[in-house]
Image (spheres, coloured by chain):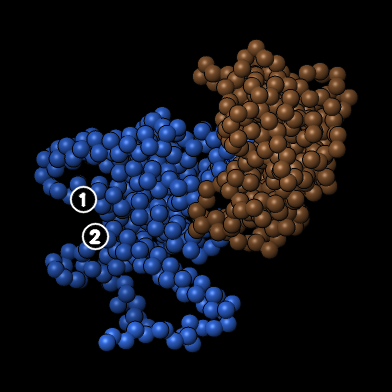
Chain colours: A brown, B blue
């Protein structure tokens, strides 16, 4: 929660003491974390923990009651081209006359009014982007006919073609089989590195991300602990975050977060515990792996 | 050659004023419906389109009572209904369906009353048929300039909103993330649908106008993958269908049973449906052939396992 630190590190994203209430219920409680260019970060938490609200806040679709959100050091405007977004799923009819390349082109200027003037430069940009996400071979297929993983690639191309500084992805692995999910994760890690942008993707299971994730933003009960995986995914830190004892177990390179007594992955309560400060892991970049 | 032309176009076809008006009005309406229809199908709002035109019955029958062109009645009720739909529910899908169904049936009940009054006032049932099923030959020449103007407005707005509409039809979330005011855009499109429904209700009536909205669009989706191209193709299919319908209806004055001509709306809808079937069958065959080429074995070469009964 320090503005001077923000400017020093040239953060792509900074949330500072963000609180949100919805219908009298507190959804986010003093959430603070930052992302730097090239960061590949997981927004980890169970359903209802507040992940989606955090994403909506960053996109400027929701106003925080307290605190501020800085993207590229600036407060959010209505049209924010520095944030690219990939929703969890698009529901599009298989017959719909919309090719993958049309959807990518809409990423360039989909919000503009008036008919589009086709140009060679536009076409070239779209082709390059499709190539970058390895989607060139189904560029002319209908979007509705593509598999989940293929659609995901097209949506990533759509989000990246306007050259954002930050890419947000809502549960990209939720509807994919393990292999396509892994391919998407690898692709994103590569893009974050190559294009020097920050990627923040939400997930309820952190394990598929462990090999590539260099930051974790762990959400529980509307509060957040952020840092490297080694700093955050620890029994003391998460117990403090949850407000009751949890154990972090490492089995065969996998991480399991279990409630103190109950040994099951999803058995983590999510009532916010007002009054207790969120765990703040401030250090950067330990060993990124587990 | 002349014999063929005479066989297709019954004598007097090209010299009849109602026919000329019908050809012009039919083409305008078809172009607008085709373009709006593609976006309607893309956005999955076919039912809303149907509700808009069906509710136009109320406005159309009221307009008859007051003595103005039904076009204005269709238009007024369309705009009111679009506003109501937006107000009723963008939140809950289930609630919206129930609300739409309730409003729809109530409005049609009210229309039944107004149509009854119309029938009493005119001592003819023609009004009811015209409102519900339309009649291209009954369009008065005076309304044609208004129709042209409204069509141009509709197409211009559609061209302006083309990209945001396309994007928000893929995902409202995606559109909102780019700063598109999704709700206002949704209302704007409902108004466009209302406008297009009003125009097509003049041509083929409130009940059949959905056919003109959805039919050519559905056919176009089979034929092309490009959104803008689909709109153009749908418009062209609509024009062909209405014109073919007009020709056939004019011919039908020589047909059984009464020699008074069959309703033109019947022919238009029949042609639209036939074209859809042909396009659907064509693409299926093409897909099957492509599959065979890939596997290297044509379907015919593989003998079907025959079941011999004992």
Q: Secondary structure at mark 2?
A: loop
Disc sitting over residue B129 in the figure: 1
Q: Is residue A172 left or right of residue B201?
A: right
Vertically, is B78 above or below A144? above
Q: Residue at x 37, y 62 (%)?
A: B272
The answer to whether residue B63 is visible is: no
Percent coordinates x, y for residue B173 in the rendering: 58, 38
2 and 1 marks on the same chain: yes
Mark 2, residues whose alpha carbon is within 10 Å: few (<14), some, or many (≥20)? many
Vertically, is A64 above or below B64? above
State which chain disc 2 sits on: B
Percent coordinates x, y for residue A42 in the rendering: 71, 37
Mark 1, residues whose alpha carbon is within 10 Å: few (<14), some, or many (≥20)? few
Q: Residue at x 85, y 30 (%)?
A: A284
Q: In this view, which residue lies farthest toward the front?
A: A261
Percent coordinates x, y for residue A195 in the rendering: 82, 45
Q: Residue at x 75, y 30 (%)?
A: A234
**Quarter in which the N terminus of chain A is drawn:** top right
Q: In this view, which residue lies farthest toward the top?
A: A275
Q: Is residue B109 left or right of residue A107?
A: left
Residue B250, by quadrant, is: bottom left
Percent coordinates x, y for residue B213 in the rendering: 40, 52
- Closer to the camera, A179 or B21? A179
Disc sitting over residue B8 in the figure: none
**Quarter in which the C terminus of chain A is drawn:** top right
Residue A220, by quadrant, is: top right
Q: Is residue B74 left or right of residue A23?
A: left
Q: What residue does disc 2 label?
A: B263
Q: Is residue A155 left or right of residue B93?
A: right
Q: Secondary structure at mark 1?
A: helix
State which chain disc 1 sits on: B
């Amino acid at each position: 929660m320090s503005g001077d630190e923000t400017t020093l590190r040239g953060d792509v994203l900074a949330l500072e003491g963000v609180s949100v209430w919805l219908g009298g219920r507190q959804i986010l409680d003093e959430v603070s974390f930052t992302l730097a260019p090239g960061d590949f970060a997981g927004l980890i938490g169970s359903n209802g923990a507040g992940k989606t609200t955090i994403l909506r806040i960053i996109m400027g679709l929701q106003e925080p009651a307290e605190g501020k959100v800085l993207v590229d050091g600036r407060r959010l405007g209505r049209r924010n081209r520095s944030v690219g977004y990939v929703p969890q799923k698009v529901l599009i009819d298989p017959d719909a006359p919309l090719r993958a390349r049309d959807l990518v082109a809409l990423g360039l200027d989909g919000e503009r009014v008036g008919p589009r003037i086709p140009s060679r430069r536009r076409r070239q940009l779209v082709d390059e982007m499709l190539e970058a996400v390895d989607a060139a071979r189904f560029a002319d297929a209908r979007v509705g006919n593509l598999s989940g993983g293929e659609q995901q690639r097209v949506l990533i191309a759509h989000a990246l073609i306007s050259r954002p500084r930050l890419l947000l992805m809502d549960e990209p692995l939720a509807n994919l089989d393990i292999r396509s999910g892994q391919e998407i994760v690898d692709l994103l890690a590569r893009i974050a590195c190559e294009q020097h942008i920050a990627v923040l993707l939400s997930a309820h299971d952190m394990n598929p991300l462990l090999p590539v994730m260099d930051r974790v933003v762990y959400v529980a009960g509307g509060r957040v602990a952020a840092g490297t995986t080694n700093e955050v995914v620890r029994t003391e830190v998460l117990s403090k975050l949850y407000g009751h004892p949890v154990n972090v177990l490492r089995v065969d390179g996998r991480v399991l977060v279990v409630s103190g007594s109950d040994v099951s992955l999803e058995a983590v309560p999510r009532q916010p515990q007002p009054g207790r400060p969120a765990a703040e892991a401030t250090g950067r970049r330990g060993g990124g792996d587990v | 050659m002349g014999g063929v032309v005479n066989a297709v176009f019954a004598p007097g076809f090209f010299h009849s004023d109602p026919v000329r008006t019908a050809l012009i009005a039919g083409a305008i309406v078809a172009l607008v419906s085709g373009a709006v229809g593609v976006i309607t199908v893309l956005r999955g709002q076919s039912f809303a389109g149907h509700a808009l035109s069906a509710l136009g019955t109320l406005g159309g029958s009221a307009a008859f009572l007051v003595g103005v062109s039904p076009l204005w009645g269709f238009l007024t009720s369309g705009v009111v209904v679009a506003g109501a739909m937006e107000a009723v529910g963008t939140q809950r899908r289930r609630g919206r369906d129930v609300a739409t169904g309730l409003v729809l049936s109530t409005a049609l009940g009210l229309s039944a009353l107004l149509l009854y009054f119309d029938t009493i006032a005119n001592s003819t049932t023609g009004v009811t048929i015209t409102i519900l099923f339309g009649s291209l030959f009954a369009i008065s020449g005076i309304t044609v300039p208004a129709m042209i103007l409204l069509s141009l407005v509709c197409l211009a707005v559609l061209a302006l909103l083309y990209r945001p509409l396309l994007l928000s039809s893929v995902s409202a979330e995606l559109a909102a993330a780019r700063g598109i005011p999704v709700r206002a855009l949704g209302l704007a499109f409902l108004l466009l649908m209302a406008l297009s429904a009003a125009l097509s209700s003049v041509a083929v009536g409130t009940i059949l106008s959905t056919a003109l909205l959805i039919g050519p669009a559905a056919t176009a989706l089979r034929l092309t993958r490009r959104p803008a191209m689909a709109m153009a193709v749908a418009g062209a299919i609509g024009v062909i269908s209405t014109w073919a319908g007009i020709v056939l209806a004019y011919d039908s004055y020589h047909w059984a049973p009464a020699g008074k001509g069959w309703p033109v709306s019947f022919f238009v809808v029949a042609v639209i449906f036939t074209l859809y079937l042909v396009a659907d069958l064509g693409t299926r065959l093409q897909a099957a052939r492509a599959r065979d080429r890939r596997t290297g074995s044509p379907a015919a070469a593989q003998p079907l396992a025959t079941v011999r009964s004992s």
